[in-house]
Image (cartoon, rainbow, N blue to C red):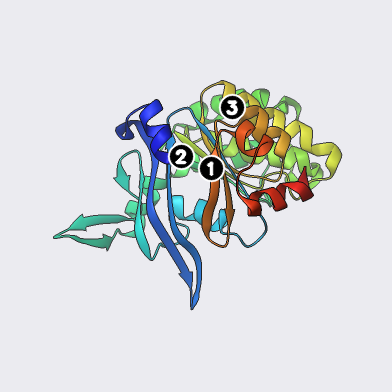
Amino acid sequence: MQAERSAAGAAASEAIVEARGVKKRFGRLEVLKGITMDVRRGEVAVLIGPSGSGKSTFLRCINHLERINGGTLRVRGHLVGYRERDGKLHELRESEIAQQRRGIGMVFQRFNLFPHMTVLENLCEAPIHVAGVRPAQARATALDLLERVGLPDKVNAYPGKLSGGQQQRVAIARALAMNPELMLFDEPTSALDPELVGDVLEVMKQLAEDGMTMVVVTHEMGFAREVGDYLAFMDGGVIVEEGRPADVLGNPQEPRTQAFLSKVL
């Protein structure tokens, strides 16, 4: 299926994420057993599967929050966390890795906002102190982003005074404040009460419509079907089945995919 996508779509050089045989171990436990995947510019790639299948680990490998043990991962054509010299991979310095991450936004299950900072301060912190943006420009961008995620009235609120759904929308705005080319979402609605999920998914849907390249780990099958361009079902550290979301969700070919979807759809 990966070959079919490459043949039918853009060339590999236009891929934002290029994973080739990615492996990851924690001690003796091999969590990723050779993941190969392309995510092209403007595409929404959705990863589904049971807990422990390797979805979140793979997502964390994309921005080098986890170091891979085999294969290669490239984002925008550059090796993630490494440089190649004399046929060997050498890990970059932490400052160089941080520079790579500036183009990658990540939203976690838990919101990871700074509790002692206001919403506005949360959004301005990284642009000012990491990217060197002038405070006035950072503030203007933050206000625009809060308008975009539907929270213009929460500028001076502290995270502890917001609902879970509001905190997650602030977390998305904070990631966007660094003007990333790629957004990673690690089950962004799993910690939310059911009635709060829709607001977060609506923000993500708007990002997709605006052309943001996204890799999303989720259990929200409606979102996967409606917004996703590509879906991979993972289990046991491998991609069991992949393709267009409507095809995989509507007519799964692999017995393991069928069994999983029979319990979640």
Identify which residue, 42 or 52, lies in the foreground: 52
Element marked by disc 3: helix
Helix, strand or loop status at disc 2: loop
Residue occupying image coordinates x 47% and y 32%: 179
- In this view, which residue lies farthest toward the left? 86
For residue 197, side relative to residue 173 (left or right):
right
Residue 25 to residue 87: above or below: below
Q: Position of residue 222 (x, y in %)?
A: 73, 34
Image side of residue 219 versus residue 193, left or right: left
For the point 81% across and 42% down, which residue is it? 163
Image position, residue 68 (x, y; %): 40, 62
- The residue that disc 3 covers is 207
Mark 2 or mark 1, earlier in chain: 2
Residues at badges 2 and 1 in contact (C-beta under 8 Å)?
A: yes
Is 78 or 152 nearer to us in this picture? Answer: 78
Which residue was labeled with disc 2?
Answer: 1
- Pointer 1 residue: 242
Q: Secondary structure at mark 1?
A: strand
- Front-lying residue, 77 or 231: 231
Question: What amino acid type is highlighted by mark number 2?
Answer: Met
Question: In terms of sequence position, does the residue under pointer 3 or pointer 1 come before the other?
Answer: 3
Determine whether label 3 and label 2 are within 8 Å by CB: no
Q: Is residue 147 above or below residue 238?
A: above
Give the distance between the C-alpha atoms of the residues marked 3 and 2, in whole angstroms.
26 Å
Q: Is residue 169 left or right of residue 13?
A: right
Task: Report the front residue among 164 and 202.
Answer: 202
